[in-house]
């Protein structure tokens, strides 16, 4: 789901401020520090795989950044324990040995399965979560919705030699999803501002992890080559639960281990502040608007590890895309990012940086 909008779109800010701002945006990694906005992102689609016009099923969702702190509102703690999970048991620690639960190790590990999707810096991609999937886009990887993408689209993409990554929200409850009733009510928390029908989840709860494990099973059964779990930085937002940074690290490590246990590649979505602890456990990163938020330097550990950073900046109107691309692409190409200019609804339209 796309990140919260800035007060002004990046393209307008750059146009108003002139060359100095554009130069600064293009050299974000040279900054010695950046104020990191903990965010969530990625779009969700309607229940119709070919259209996105059902108002009861939001097309996209996002969290609102908030100062870190202990939320005072709670809806109860459904967790009997908060210990970390394993790939075979959603309640024990997955991090001591990345292959202990079967499957494959992460990209970069000496025991990684050669069949695992391990994209390097500059890999091409397309991100489409709404509308009829355009399988003709020239990209090596397609990131599409786990539930809504039709089987024939996945088959066509594989037939053309494309990698298929399947999106799902791991940290939020979306009331239009077919498994929405499987989440325990006590684990459903505060709403995500601006995204009707979506609420934060208590990611410590074993019952939540069981539903998410079933989603990973679905991804493997549908033939997805990997997954893009969304909303994995709840600890930095007002969720209705007292989630800590340690809780988030535990959950994100569990997601990575569970994906690898099924032979699935897995990307870290945003959660920039925890990249140093998580880069070795994830295979690639997906970031939204790091230029707009002046935080691209925080993604450097993925590039340094030889792992792709898939990056997006947004426009309200496709007519503004070329101007934004002229500003964004030189800087992110130099960083080794795989950058796209997209609309907020994450339909088929795109401009890919060279």
Image (cartoon, grey):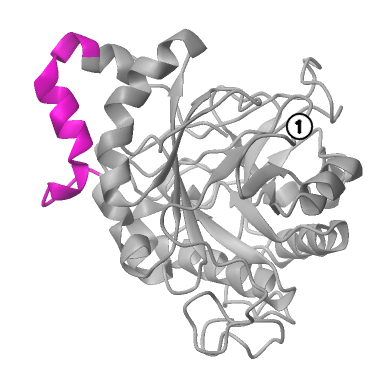
Query: Is 333 on the left or on the right of 190, as rendered?
Result: left
- Identify the main secondary structure in magenta: helix
Q: Is residue 305 above or below residue 248?
A: below
Does the magenta segment cover residue 23? yes
What range of the chain is rendered magenta?
15-35
Nearest the camera: 338 or 96? Answer: 338
* Number of numbered discs on residues: 1
* Residue at (85, 51) in percent of width and height: 182
For residue 67, say whether it is visible: yes
Residue 335 rendering spot, x and y as whole percentages: 28, 49
* Residue at (52, 62) in percent of width and height: 119
How crowded pointer 1 is (Cα within 10 Å; few <14, some 14-19, many 20+) is rated as many
Disc 1 designates what residue?
133
Query: Is 133 on the left or on the right of 354, as rendered?
Result: right
* Residue at (69, 79) in percent of width and height: 87
Nearest the camera: 178 or 227? Answer: 227
Query: Quarter of the image holding residue 347?
Result: top right
* Residue at (43, 74) in percent of width and height: 280
For residue 183, say whether it is visible: no
């Amino acid at each position: 789901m796309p990140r919260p909008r800035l007060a002004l779109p990046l393209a307008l800010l750059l146009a108003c401020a002139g060359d100095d701002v554009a130069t600064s945006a293009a050299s974000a990694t040279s900054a010695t520090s950046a104020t990191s906005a903990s965010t969530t992102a990625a779009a969700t689609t309607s229940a119709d795989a070919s259209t996105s016009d059902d108002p009861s099923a939001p097309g996209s969702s996002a969290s609102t950044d908030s100062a870190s702190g202990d939320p005072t509102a709670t809806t109860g703690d459904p967790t009997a324990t908060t210990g970390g999970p394993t790939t075979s048991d959603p309640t024990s620690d997955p991090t001591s040995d990345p292959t202990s639960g079967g499957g494959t190790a992460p990209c970069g590990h000496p025991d990684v399965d050669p069949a695992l999707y391990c994209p390097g810096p500059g890999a091409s991609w397309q991100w489409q979560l709404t509308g009829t999937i355009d399988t003709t886009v020239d990209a090596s990887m397609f990131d599409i919705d786990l539930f809504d993408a039709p089987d024939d689209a996945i088959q066509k993409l594989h037939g053309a030699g494309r990698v298929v990554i399947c999106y799902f929200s791991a940290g939020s409850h979306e009331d239009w999803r077919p498994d929405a009733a499987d989440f325990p009510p006590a684990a459903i928390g505060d709403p995500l501002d601006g995204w009707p029908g979506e609420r934060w989840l208590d990611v410590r709860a074993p019952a939540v992890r069981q539903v998410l494990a079933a989603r990973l099973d679905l991804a493997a059964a549908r033939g997805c080559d990997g997954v893009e779990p969304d909303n994995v930085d709840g600890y930095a937002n007002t969720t209705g639960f007292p989630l800590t940074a340690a809780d988030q690290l535990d959950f994100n490590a569990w997601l990575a281990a569970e994906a690898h246990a099924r032979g699935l590649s897995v990307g870290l979505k945003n959660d920039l502040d925890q990249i140093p602890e998580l880069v070795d456990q994830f295979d690639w990163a997906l970031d939204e608007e790091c230029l707009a938020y002046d935080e691209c330097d925080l993604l450097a550990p993925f590039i340094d590890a030889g792992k792709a950073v898939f990056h997006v900046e947004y426009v309200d109107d496709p007519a503004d895309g070329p101007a934004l691309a002229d500003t964004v692409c030189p800087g992110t190409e130099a960083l080794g990012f795989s950058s796209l200019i997209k609309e907020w609804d994450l339909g088929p339209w795109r401009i890919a940086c060279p």
